[in-house]
Image (cartoon, rainbow, N blue to C red):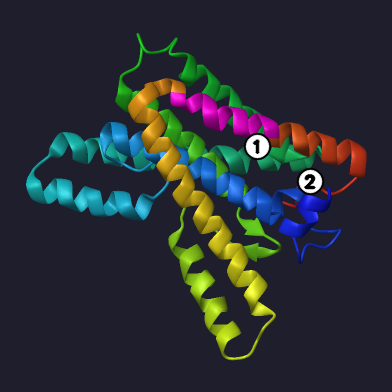
C-alpha cells in the first residue's frame, strides 16, 4: 500500500477510496477511452457534452440532420445514465450498501457484452455508441470528488481550470495549493492518455477495444472489494 500513499499525499483515513487521486486518474482514463471510441466511430463524444453541443450547432449549420439527430440521442443517453446512477445510489443508500460496487459492476457488464460483438447483428454502430454514452453518464454522475474536491472524470474543462487556478495560487506563495494542482493535472493526463489509447485501439480492434476499459474497471472493482474487506476503509460517501 506504500505506492498508493505516495499517489494520495493528502488523503485522510476518512476519505472514501473512490475519491483517491489514483481512482480519479483511472476513471478519467476510462472516460478518455470511451470518447476515443465514439468519436472515431460516429464523430460524437460519449462524455464531453459541451463538445457535442458545438457539434450539434455545426450539424445544424451544415444541414447534416442525420448527425444532428445522432448527437441529440447521445446527449439523451448520457442523461439517462446519470439518472440511473442517481436511482442506484438512492436504493443502495436506503439499504446502507456501497453503491459504487453496483455501478462499476454494471459498467463492466455492459462493456464486456459490447466487446464480444454478440450484439453486432442487432445493433448499429450508433446504438452501440449510445450505450457507451449511457455508461459514461453513469460514471460521470457517480464519481465526482477527488480528495474531497469536486472534479469531473468525464468533463475535463473544469479540471483544467482548477489545475491552473491552484498553480497560480502556488506561484503567489500558497505552496499548499501545489498538491491540489498536481492532482488535477494528474486527472487531465489520465483523460488524454485514455483518448489516445481509445482511438488507436478502436482503429485496430473495433468493438474489442471495449475489453480494455472493462478489464481496468474489473480490476478497480476487485481492489475496492479488497479495500473494504482487508482495511475497513470507507469505499464511497453519501451520494449527493
Asked whether, in this view, residue 221 is left or right of residue 51, the answer is right
SS for tag 2? Answer: loop
Is residue 214 within the magenta segment?
Answer: yes
Q: Mark 2 points at which residue?
A: 235
Residue drawn 54% across the image and 40% down it: 138
Report whether 108 appears left or right of 92.
Answer: left
User: Height in image: 9 above or below 214?
Assistant: below
Q: Which of 197 and 220 is in front in this view?
A: 197
**Quadrant of the drawing holding the C terminus:** bottom right
Q: In which quarter of the image is residue 13?
A: bottom right
Q: Where is residue 59 in the image (x, y as percent from the top left)?
A: 16, 46
Q: In this view, does 232 lie to the left or right of 8?
A: right
Q: Please tell me how many numbered marks the rendered image carries.
A: 2
Nearer to me, 62 or 77: 62
Residue 77 visible in the current orientation: no
Do we see residue 194 in this rendering? yes
Q: In percent of the image, x 51 and y 63: which residue is there? A: 159
The residue pinned by badge 1 equals 88
- Cα–Cα span, label 1 and label 2: 16 Å
Within 10 angstroms of label 1, few (less than 14), some, or many (20 or more) residues?
some
Residue under the point 45% across and 9% down: 118
Give the magenta-colored segment's residue range.
209-219
Q: Quick one: which residue is furthest to the bottom in this view?
A: 172
Question: Does residue 92 sit above or below 106 in this rendering?
Answer: below
Q: Is residue 123 magenta?
A: no
Q: In which quarter of the image is residue 9?
A: bottom right
Q: In which quarter of the image is residue 195?
A: top left
Q: Is residue 174 above or below residue 210?
A: below
Q: Is mark 1 on a helix, strand or loop?
A: helix
Amino acid at each position: 500500500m506504500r505506492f498508493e500513499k505516495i499517489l494520495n499525499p493528502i488523503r485522510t483515513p476518512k476519505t472514501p477510496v473512490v475519491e483517491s487521486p489514483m481512482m480519479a486518474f483511472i476513471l478519467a482514463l476510462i472516460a478518455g477511452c470511451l470518447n476515443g471510441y465514439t468519436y472515431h466511430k460516429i464523430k460524437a463524444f460519449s462524455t464531453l457534452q459541451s463538445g457535442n453541443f458545438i457539434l450539434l450547432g455545426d450539424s445544424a449549420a451544415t444541414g447534416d440532420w442525420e448527425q444532428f439527430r445522432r448527437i441529440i440521442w447521445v446527449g439523451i443517453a448520457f442523461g439517462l445514465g446519470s439518472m440511473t446512477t442517481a436511482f442506484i445510489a438512492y436504493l443502495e443508500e436506503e439499504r446502507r450498501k456501497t453503491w459504487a460496487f453496483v455501478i462499476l459492476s454494471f459498467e463492466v457488464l455492459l462493456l464486456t457484452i459490447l466487446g464480444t460483438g454478440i450484439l453486432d447483428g442487432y445493433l448499429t454502430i450508433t446504438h452501440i455508441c449510445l450505450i457507451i454514452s449511457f455508461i459514461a453518464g453513469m460514471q460521470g454522475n457517480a464519481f465526482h470528488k477527488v480528495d474531497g474536491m469536486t472534479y469531473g472524470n468525464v468533463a475535463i474543462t473544469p479540471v483544467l481550470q482548477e489545475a491552473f487556478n491552484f498553480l497560480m495560487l502556488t506561484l503567489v506563495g500558497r505552496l499548499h495549493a501545489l498538491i491540489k494542482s498536481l492532482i488535477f493535472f494528474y486527472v487531465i493526463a489520465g483523460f488524454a492518455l485514455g483518448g489516445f489509447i481509445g482511438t488507436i485501439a478502436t482503429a485496430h480492434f473495433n468493438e474489442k477495444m471495449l475489453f480494455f476499459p472493462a478489464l481496468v474497471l474489473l480490476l478497480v472493482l476487485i481492489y475496492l472489494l479488497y479495500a473494504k474487506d482487508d482495511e475497513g476503509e470507507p469505499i464511497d460517501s453519501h451520494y449527493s
